[in-house]
């Protein structure tokens, strides 16, 4: 079994970097082969732009999808993109490790998705979801947040964690991955401290042990359900008899008048 970890944190001594290393160590102990991409250490450019394409389809106007499709067809994708696609293709499990910043992933991880989930090579109209490039492979988010599970619960002040993570999970499902439930490390206090140092230290120890335990049995984790292409009608909307798994893709509630 092979795994690939993508780390998005600028500090090599951060807890996120530690969790990425812990994931690699734990999976190797379980017999996995593990590769790791450290986006900041590698200087990955998150900005998709014309300068990445040496032989553009149109040198006068940059259209992202057209250039990605052209480069895919010509075998001319940027080497840093090709190497990441190769690692994803070889992996049975992909882990995205990052901190929650302003309710979103760091910009470098979003840019990694912009550039690596290439139109043509990774997805196109008939090459997504259950027909996607990475069908049969699993992916999961491992994310750190600064406050408690209660603040990220339904109606919590930080927002429902399942909804906040849905766009990244949906993107993973879009390119074919089976998405596993995220591992959320709560209460990873950094510059702003709300708790006594000893409390934080014990919390971090518990997070590490729980994460190791999760990874030891990751192969048996349930899969988060997402709609498939057959669930949508010709108009692109969910069919009346199709299941709905998220408030983001849902059936309209009919207004009842007494």
Image (cartoon, rainbow, N blue to C red):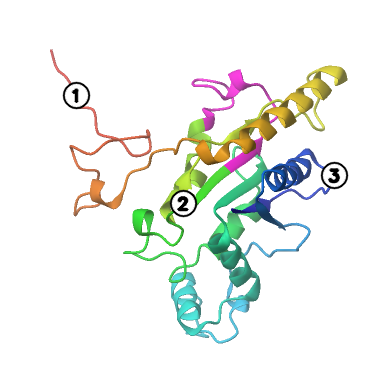
Q: CA distance from mark 1 to mark 3?
A: 54 Å
Judging depth in this view, the residue of 220 and 159 nearest the camera is 220
Looking at marks 2 and 1 on the same chain, the residue that comes earlier in the sequence is marked by: 2
Q: Nearer the viewer, mark 2 or mark 3?
A: 2
Q: Nearer the viewer, mark 1 or mark 3?
A: 3
- Residue, x 57% and y 57% (percent of image)? 91
- Residue, x 75% and y 63% (percent of image)? 43
Q: Looking at the picture, does residue 257 appear above or below residue 7?
A: above
Mark 3 lies on a secondary structure that is loop
Mark 1 lies on a secondary structure that is loop
Judging depth in this view, the residue of 92 and 82 nearest the camera is 92
Q: Which residues are magenta?
A: 141-161
Within 10 Å of disc 1 (Cα), the crowding (few <14, some 14-19, many 20+) is: few
Q: Position of residue 149 (x, y in %)?
A: 61, 21
Which of the labelled discs sits on residue 177, or is there none? 2
Mark 2 lies on a secondary structure that is loop
Within 10 Å of disc 3 (Cα), the crowding (few <14, some 14-19, many 20+) is: few
Judging depth in this view, the residue of 20 and 111 nearest the camera is 20
Q: Position of residue 113 (x, y in %)?
A: 56, 58
């Amino acid at each position: 079994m092979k795994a690939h970890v993508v780390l998005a944190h600028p500090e090599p001594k951060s807890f996120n970097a530690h969790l990425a290393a812990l994931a690699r160590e734990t999976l190797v102990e379980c017999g996995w082969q593990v590769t790791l991409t450290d986006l900041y250490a590698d200087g990955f450019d998150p900005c998709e732009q014309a300068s990445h394409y040496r032989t553009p389809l149109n040198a006068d106007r940059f259209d992202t999808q057209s250039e990605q499709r052209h480069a895919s067809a010509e075998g001319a994708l940027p080497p840093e993109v090709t190497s990441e696609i190769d690692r994803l293709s070889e992996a049975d499990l992909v882990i995205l490790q990052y901190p929650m910043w302003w309710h979103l992933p760091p910009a470098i991880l979003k840019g990694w998705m912009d550039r690596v989930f290439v139109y043509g090579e990774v997805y196109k109209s008939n090459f997504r979801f259950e027909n996607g490039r990475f069908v049969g492979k699993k992916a999961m988010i491992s994310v750190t947040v600064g406050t408690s599970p209660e603040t990220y619960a339904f109606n919590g002040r930080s927002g429902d964690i399942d909804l906040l993570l849905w766009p990244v999970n949906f993107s993973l499902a879009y390119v074919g991955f089976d998405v596993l439930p995220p591992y959320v490390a709560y209460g990873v206090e950094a510059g702003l401290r709300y708790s006594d140092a000893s409390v934080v230290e014990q919390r971090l120890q518990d997070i590490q042990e729980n994460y190791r335990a999760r990874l030891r049995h990751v192969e048996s984790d349930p899969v988060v359900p997402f709609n498939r292409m057959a669930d949508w009608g010709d108009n692109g909307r969910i069919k009346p008899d199709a299941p709905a798994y998220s408030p983001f893709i849902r059936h309209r509630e009919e207004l009842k008048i007494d």
